[in-house]
Amino acid sequence: MSRDQDIQLEKDRARYGLLAVVVSNLAIAAVAVFGVWRLNGNESVIIGVLTAAFTAVSSMTTAYLGIKAVSNTAKSLAAATSTHPAETPTPPTQRTP
C-alpha cells in the first residue's frame, strides 16, 4: 500500500467514525426528546431521561475522541521510529590498569 492510499484510508476511517458518532448522538437525542414529549410533564422521570441521554451522548463522543487521539499518537510514534531506527549501543572500551 502506498503512502497516499494509507492517508486516504485514514481520512475515510476518521470521516465515517465521526459520522457514526454524530448519527448515534442524533438518534439518542431524538429518543430522549420523544420520551420527554410522551411523559406529559412528570418532572422526575424527565430528569432521569435527560440525564441518561446526556450520559450516553457524552460517553459516545468521549470514547470516539479518545480512541482517535490514541490512534493518532500511535501512528505518529510508529512513523518517528521507522524514520529514525534505534541506534545500537556501542560497548564501552576496555581500559587496562
Image: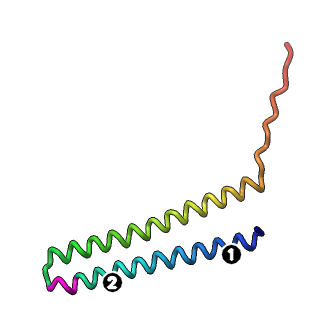
Magenta stretch, main secondary structure, is helix
Q: Residue furthest front?
A: 1
Q: Please tell me which residue lies in front, 58 or 9.
A: 9
Going by the image, does 77 lie left or right of 43? right
The boundaries of the magenta stretch are: 36-40
Please tell me whether residue 49 belongs to the stretch shown in magenta: no
In this figure, which residue is indicated by the disc labeled 1? 8
Q: Dot 2 surroundings within 10 Å: few (below 14), some, or many (20 or more)?
A: few
From what the image shows, is residue 68 above or below residue 32? above
Please tell me whether residue 38 belongs to the stretch shown in magenta: yes
In primary-sequence order, the first of circles 1 and 2 is 1
- Picture quarter containing residue 53? bottom left
Q: Please tell me which residue lies in front, 95 or 24.
A: 24
Q: Secondary structure at mark 1?
A: helix
Q: Dot 1 surroundings within 10 Å: few (below 14), some, or many (20 or more)?
A: few
From what the image shows, is residue 9 above or below residue 88? below
Q: Residue 70, image x and y in percent?
A: 55, 60
Measure the C-alpha gap from mark 1 to mark 2. Answer: 33 Å
Q: Residue 55, image x and y in percent?
A: 32, 69
In this figure, which residue is indicated by the disc labeled 2? 30
Amino acid at circle 1: Gln
Amino acid at circle 2: Ala
- Residue 77 tag number: none
Q: Secondary structure at mark 2?
A: helix
